[in-house]
Amino acid sequence: MNVTCPAGTFSGSSVNGVHEFKGIRYATSERFCPPTPYDYPEGIHEMLEDAPYAIQHEAQLETHLTGMDYMNYPQEENCQYLSITAPDHDPQHGKLPVMVWVHGGSYRNGGCDAACYNRRYLALEGDVIVVGINFRIGLLGFLRNHDGNLSNNGLLDIIEALKWIKRNIESFGGDSDNITLFGHSSGADAVRSVILSEGTERLYSKAIIQSDPIGAMNADRDDMSRKMLEEAMQMPADADVETIRGVQLSLRDHVTEESLAKHLIFGPHYGLYPLPKKEDFNDHLREMAKDHPLMIGTTTREVSSYIYPNKTLTFLDKFPLTGWYIEKRIIATTEEVFGEPSREFAEQYAEAGGETFHYTYRWHEHQKPIGASHGSELTLLFSADYLPDDADLLKGTNKQEIHDTGKNLRKIWTTFARTGNPQSKGIDNVIDIRQM
């Protein structure tokens, strides 16, 4: 299938009921510089390969949970690519809603075409177009700029991707006036950062924020960021990719910060373009919230996925006293980093005039070792087809149950994308939803 849009003419694939166009470049950049828009030369360009990932190192948690090793995937310094999945049929009700996925990975890892982000089921069942975007992360995306100062270049990449989608998506059958941003973990935080950014109001219409570690982002990060920048500045500006990976690992391994900021060392910087200072958030929200419905929430045991790869803690959890203490710490840290800050942002957004829905995800919350952990809802949204049969995320369930339950969860997400209202109070024993 060929599509001609303002950015060029692209040839995609048609398989399993969807059209896919993978690895379309939306921007390019010089090292440490903001992105610039990219248009393709004349001719038909085949878009059949996964979008290259950002420069990154191994992701131990993701590998433990899913068996995926991001180091086995192509990586590229200028990783400003996006991939589009659309239903393989003529729209029944005009142009289709668009959902833009922002991947997580602590601003250090991940990519939009990872096997765990299978966009097909959302697109087919919800009759929506789903776009995944890649952007610079880590040192190149969220630490230094060309002048040696702190940088929000990764956030600027995401905004540039939204501009591309706004300008081109109607050629793929999408509604450029009905774009929903959704993301998980650091991807959710990136979505929140887009909401808070200057000049983004017309680039999207709705947003879904899943398990945003707001507590880590709202901690005092200035001293940590300054020390990291000083260390990064010792690296030559023209260092090769392997050197960049090494410096990034060194930064991660030598952080001495004791506040919640230590849980998310890379990320957007408040008060640095395009983000306002924290004390100006309310003013910004009052200007735009009423026109942009929001759904935001967390799981009940977010941090269990971080604790249970530790064999010592897994062993101690088998005993009543130590098990009780570990569970207490899981719940307390979940609340501190994710739960309470997300509810506070939901309240802040609602008070600013935005239609706001808050959810709590609890499916299999008492199933050890993981339960309703950080990222456990992603298998329902995107499928568990990729998981090895012995994966921790499958403990207490199976792929068919995940698919069946996921169909109901996907309906909530795509209904919100279509209408701005999930039109549901949730799913018994899976997710609770309330309007703020």
Image: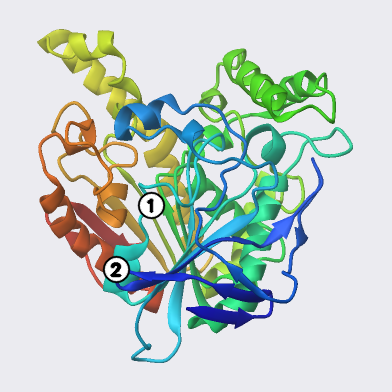
Q: Is residue 429 visible?
A: no
Residue 228 in which image quadrant: top right
Q: Amino acid at mark 2?
A: Asn
Q: Is residue 165 left or right of residue 215?
A: right
Pointer 1 residue: 117
Q: Provide the secondary structure element on which disc 2 rests.
A: loop
Looking at this rendering, what residue extends furthest in the right direction?
A: 147
Up-down: is 186 above or below 331?
below
Q: Quadrant of the C terminus?
A: bottom left
Q: Nearer the viewer, mark 2 or mark 1?
A: 2
Q: Nearer the viewer, residue 58 or 11?
A: 11
Give the class, few, some or many, for how many residues have Cα within 10 Å of label 1's Cα (few <14, many ≥20). Answer: some
Q: Residue at x 61, y 16 (%)?
A: 255
Q: Position of residue 80 (x, y in %)?
A: 65, 53
Q: Is residue 349 visible?
A: yes
Q: Nearer the viewer, residue 385 or 151?
A: 385
Up-down: is 223 above or below 197?
above
Give the class, few, some or many, for how many residues have Cα within 10 Å of label 2's Cα (few <14, many ≥20). Answer: few
Q: Position of residue 2 (x, y in %)?
A: 53, 79
Colour approach in the figure: rainbow
Q: Residue at x 54, y 53 (%)?
A: 51
Pointer 2 residue: 16
